[in-house]
Structure formats: structure tokens, C-alpha cells
Amino acid sequence: MSKLYRMKWLGDKVIKLAENKLCEILGEYALIAEGESKKELHKGHGVKTGYLRRSIHAADADYAFSKDDTGPEGSSPERGGLKIKAKKVGNKFIVRLGSGLVYAMAIHQGWNWQPGGLIGTFSGYHYLTNGVEKAKAKKSQIIARHQVKA
């Protein structure tokens, strides 16, 4: 006579655990991309005061970058370095990287921004996309740090 075995289905629990780990991995990846993006900007290469560099940060899916634009006058806080997690929205996992400064995309894309508006063009510094690309080299190390331990 054969024995009957019962198995307890843990698939939903395993899926939730894997999704949570993926959110952690993407959050760490975003922080590394943030740091790499900041390194792209330096004196003579997109930096006059450092305000733009300090404004770059990773954020969760619901963050409104527009609230960061306080204008170039006065002091500018360091907005980066905070631990975040991606958020699952439908079938996507979302984390954000950027700057809320009104002129941030002009510097990124190569529009010459002046207080009166955009004038002329230059090649741009592409600091965000370059930062994301440089962070890719560290993806295996990030994933290894977040392995599920039994």
C-alpha cells in the first residue's frame, strides 16, 4: 500500500518574500545609482555651486520631486543617502532617481539654462543615465547581499 503525503502550499508566501527582496534590491541599486550620478557632476562639468549635485536622490514610487525645487538662492540640503525600497505597482516594481530642481533636466540633456529661460545647447552631462549605467556593474554584489537565507 502506498503512503499518502500532504504538502502545505507555501507558494503565496514564497512569492511575497521574493517580491519583498526584489524591492530591497532595487532600493539599494537606486542608492548606488544616486551616488554614481552625483560623481558625474563636478566643477567644470555641471557644477557651479553644488546645488544640483546635492539635490539628486533616489525615492520611492510616490515621491513628488517637484517639491524639492526651492530655487538656487540660500542653502541647499543634501537630499540623498536615504534607504528606500521599490514599490510594486501592478506588475511593475518602481523606484525613482532624479532631482526636483527646475533646471536639472536642462543640465542633464544639454540645454543651457539661465534664470530667464533656456538658451542655446551643449552636449549635456547625462549624469542620471550615466549613474544608472555605472551602477549596473554592482548588480551581482547587490543581489548576493539580499539572498534569502533558509
Image (tube, rainbow, N blue to C red):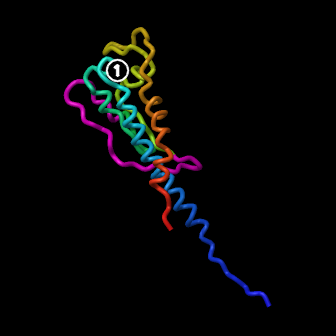
Q: Amino acid at mark 1?
A: Gly
Depth order, front residue of 141/128: 141
**Quarter assignment of residue 12:** bottom right
User: Magenta span has 71?
Assistant: yes
Q: Position of residue 137 (x, y in %)?
A: 48, 38
- 86 vs 117: above or below: below
Q: Going 45% across and 20% down the picture, which residue do you hit?
A: 109
* Magenta stretch secondary structure, dominant: loop
Q: Going 41% across and 27% down the picture, which residue do you hit?
A: 127
- Count of labels shown? 1
Number of other residues with Cα within 10 Å of mark 1, as a class: few under 14, some 14 to 19, many 20 or more: many
- 83 vs 125: above or below: below
Q: Position of residue 51 (x, y in %)?
A: 28, 27
What residue occupies the far top of the structure in this picture? 120
User: Magenta span has 80?
Assistant: yes
Q: Position of residue 76 (x, y in %)?
A: 24, 31
Q: Going 32% across and 43% down the picture, which residue do you hit?
A: 81
Can you identify the residue that label 1 sits on? 46
**Quarter assignment of residue 128:** top left
**Label 1: element kind:** strand
**Quarter assignment of residue 125:** top left
Depth order, front residue of 38/19: 38
Q: Position of residue 142 (x, y in %)?
A: 46, 48
Q: Going 31% across and 15% down the picture, which residue do you hit?
A: 115
90 on left or right of 78: right
* Residue stretch in magenta: 67-93
Quarter of the figure that contains the N terminus: bottom right
What residue occupies the far bottom of the structure in this picture? 1
